[in-house]
């Protein structure tokens, strides 16, 4: 049944909205596989092609590049045509990408296939978050956090599953199987999203009521700062998320232990993401970003200090608890500071910046490892980028409070 949520205000914060959110969480859990599969496959691919760690990290970097471009392009498509079109493109891209990677005769073709994989996964993150944000007002923060948690729920589920199948059937057959599974699981879920939230010019209630907060800079300047902050936080975030499996292998603990740590990291990241939604509904997106940035810096510093097996399990859990709410906070900030009819495009671009940070951080950490033979310098590099994010979050908090005082005066 087709309908326009924009013409039916009762659908906002309604049982239908919560049902749509539940399906979005499931879709995000499946579609996010493209974010995590290569992290587990990296050691096997590196061994098969006798590549350096930096070269073996290129497929992940291109997957993140595809994810970045996908959030930008598919976010715009979602604003214009609704979320179903991006979901269908996601299914096609994931199927083609995983089949291509499984059959690729060279590392560079594996890398090219992972660009498609990342592009396909993008539809189930930024565009899906933007779509769900229109269906909630009172609980928008928690709704954004729940749909964003699909990415981490997938990260908790997929790595041990993929590790098992790589060990038993090889990474090539595993990739082909993932592509088939995504098509079979995601296509039926796409039907749920036929109902659209449309903005007829500026005629919707949300569009008419929106007034941009005064923070002393233009919206375009704020937008650029958010993108820079996104790069900074995710260069830092990429160090443990991308390299924890390889790191454990280098320390002699085995890649299976690293996959378990990644799974734990992302499982506890789900708790962090849900908690961040409650914080955002109470205190706003900027405060949520600031808290996450401070705590992520603490966790990165702990990685620098300790490398025992038990310590790494504990720190990975803490890292997940500390940083899971950072990326969803950008979605809340976008909805607070920009018109709702621009949500898909604006959020897509900010998510693109965060993924550029993940891609850059993943490659940079591998390059630093090749130069130094250790990940210690890579952890310090991540901490430095995290401080950039923290500085922007502090500035935005102070600017917002000055603007609020000026408005009252």
Image (spheres, helix red, strand yellow):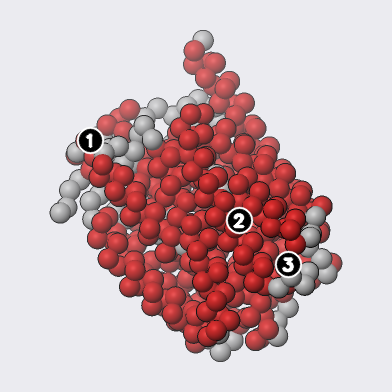
State the quadrant of the N terminus.
Answer: bottom left
Q: How crowded is mark 2: few (under 14 residues within 10 Å), some or many (20 or more)?
A: many
Q: Distance between the residues labelled 1 and 3?
A: 51 Å
Query: Which label belongs to residue 265?
Result: 2
The residue that disc 1 covers is: 9
Task: Residue at the far right: name it.
Answer: 372
Disc 1 vs disc 3: Cβ atoms closer than 8 Å? no
Q: Going from the N terminus, do you reach mark 2 or mark 1 first?
A: 1
Image location (x, y in percent) of residue 123: 40, 59
The residue that disc 3 covers is: 247
Q: Residues within 10 Å of mark 3 (few under 14, many from 20)?
A: many
Q: How far apart are marks 3 and 2 (CA)?
A: 15 Å
Residue 37 sits in quarter: bottom right
In this picture, residue 67 sits left or right of residue 402: left
User: Can residue 118 be seen at all in this image of the molecule?
Assistant: no
* Closer-to-camera residue (302/201): 302
Disc 3 vs disc 2: Cβ atoms closer than 8 Å? no
Identified at 79% across, 59% down, the residue is: 307
* Closer-to-camera residue (30/199): 30
In this picture, residue 163 sits left or right of residue 92: right
Q: Residues within 10 Å of mark 1 (few under 14, many from 20)?
A: some
**Image height of 157 relative to 196, above or below:** below
In this picture, residue 10 sits left or right of residue 145: left
Task: Residue at the far bottom: name it.
Answer: 105
Which structural element holds mark 2? helix
Image location (x, y in percent) of residue 62: 57, 69
Identified at 82% across, 66% down, the residue is: 374
Image location (x, y in percent) of residue 91: 36, 69
Which structural element holds mark 1? helix
Closer mark to the observer between disc 1 and disc 3: 3
Q: Going from the N terminus, do you reach mark 3 or mark 2 first?
A: 3
């Amino acid at each position: 049944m087709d309908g326009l949520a924009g013409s039916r205000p009762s659908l906002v914060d309604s049982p239908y909205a919560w049902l749509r959110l539940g399906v979005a969480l499931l879709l995000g859990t499946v579609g996010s596989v493209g974010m995590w599969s290569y992290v587990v496959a990296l050691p096997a691919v590196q061994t098969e092609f006798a590549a350096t760690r930096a070269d073996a990290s290129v497929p992940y970097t291109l997957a993140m590049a595809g994810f970045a471009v996908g959030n930008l392009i598919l976010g715009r498509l979602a604003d214009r045509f609704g979320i179903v079109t991006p979901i269908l493109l996601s299914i096609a891209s994931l199927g083609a990408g995983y089949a291509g990677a499984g059959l690729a005769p060279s590392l560079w073709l594996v890398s090219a296939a992972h660009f498609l994989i990342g592009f396909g996964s993008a539809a189930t993150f930024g565009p899906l978050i933007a779509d769900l944000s229109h269906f909630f007002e009172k609980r928008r923060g928690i709704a954004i956090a729940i749909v964003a948690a699909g990415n981490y729920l997938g990260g908790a589920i997929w790595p041990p599953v993929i590790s098992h199948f790589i060990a038993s059937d090889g990474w090539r057959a595993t990739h082909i199987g993932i592509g088939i599974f995504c098509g079979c699981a995601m296509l039926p879920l796409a039907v749920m999203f036929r109902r659209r939230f449309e903005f007829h010019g500026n005629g919707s209630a949300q569009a008419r009521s929106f007034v941009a907060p005064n923070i002393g800079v233009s919206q375009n300047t704020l937008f650029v700062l958010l993108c820079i902050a996104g790069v900074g936080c995710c260069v830092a975030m990429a160090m443990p998320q991308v390299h924890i499996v390889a790191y454990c292998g280098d320390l002699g603990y085995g890649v299976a232990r690293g996959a378990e740590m990644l799974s734990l990291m992302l499982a506890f990241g789900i708790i962090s993401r849900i908690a961040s939604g409650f914080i955002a509904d109470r205190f706003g997106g900027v405060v949520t970003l600031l808290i996450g940035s401070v705590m992520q810096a603490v966790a990165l510093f702990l990685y620098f200090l300790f490398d025992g097996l038990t310590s790494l399990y504990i720190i990975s859990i803490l890292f997940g608890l500390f940083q899971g709410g950072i990326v969803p906070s950008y979605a809340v900030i976008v909805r607070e500071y920009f018109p709702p009819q621009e949500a898909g495009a604006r959020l897509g671009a900010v998510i693109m910046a965060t993924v550029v940070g993940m891609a850059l951080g993943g490659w940079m950490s591998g390059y630093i490892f090749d130069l130094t033979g250790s990940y210690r310098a890579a952890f310090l590099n991540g901490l430095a980028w995290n401080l950039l994010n923290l500085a922007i979050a502090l500035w935005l908090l102070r600017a917002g409070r000055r603007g609020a005082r000026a408005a009252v005066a």
